[in-house]
Amino acid sequence: MRRKIEAAGRWVLHEIDTQEVLRRDGHIIGVARQILFFYPRLMVRLLEADRTALLEAPLKFAVMSLPDNDVALNWSAPVQDFARYGNTALAGLGTEFAVSCERIAAAAMNSSTS
């Protein structure tokens, strides 16, 4: 997943090993990772559109193993997240970011099935 994010020109800012975090408190779950990513130029555009939207960055993917040994890939929904600001420029960025997330996810899922 990290390679697909980076191949799309985004920076992986942090990876959270959710499985390990929960294990520290005695909870056992399957493999679960959260990958936070963004890119400085995108951050500048976000801040120029509406500084209060800083909360929406970075974007995030969650990768988890399922009980049937399949893998689930989920991500934040930029279109909906940005729509709440009522800002046309942010709405456009939300759409652009959503397309980027969908492309990265498709590339990751295609490489995992081949």
Image: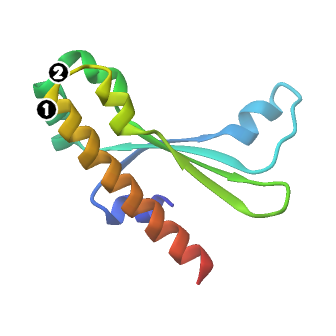
Q: Quadrant of residue 99?
A: bottom left
Colouring rule applied to residues: rainbow
Q: Which amino acid lies under the numbered mark 2 shown in the image of this protein?
A: Asp
Q: Which residue is mark 2?
A: 50
Q: Are marks 1 and 2 in contact (CB under 8 Å)?
A: yes
* Residue occupying the point 17% across, 24% down: 87
| Category of crowding for the residue at label 1, using alpha-carbon neighbours closer than 10 angstroms: few (below 14), some (14–19), many (at least 20) | some
Q: Is residue 108 left or right of residue 96?
A: right
Q: Is residue 86 left or right of residue 113?
A: left
Q: Position of residue 86 (x, y in %)?
A: 22, 20
Q: Which residue is mark 1?
A: 89
Q: Position of residue 83 (x, y in %)?
A: 30, 28
* Residue occupying the point 44% across, 65% down: 3
Q: Which mark is residue 6?
A: none
Q: Which is in the foreground here, disc 1 or disc 2? A: 1
Q: Which amino acid lies under the numbered mark 1 shown in the image of this protein?
A: Ala
SS state under label 2: loop
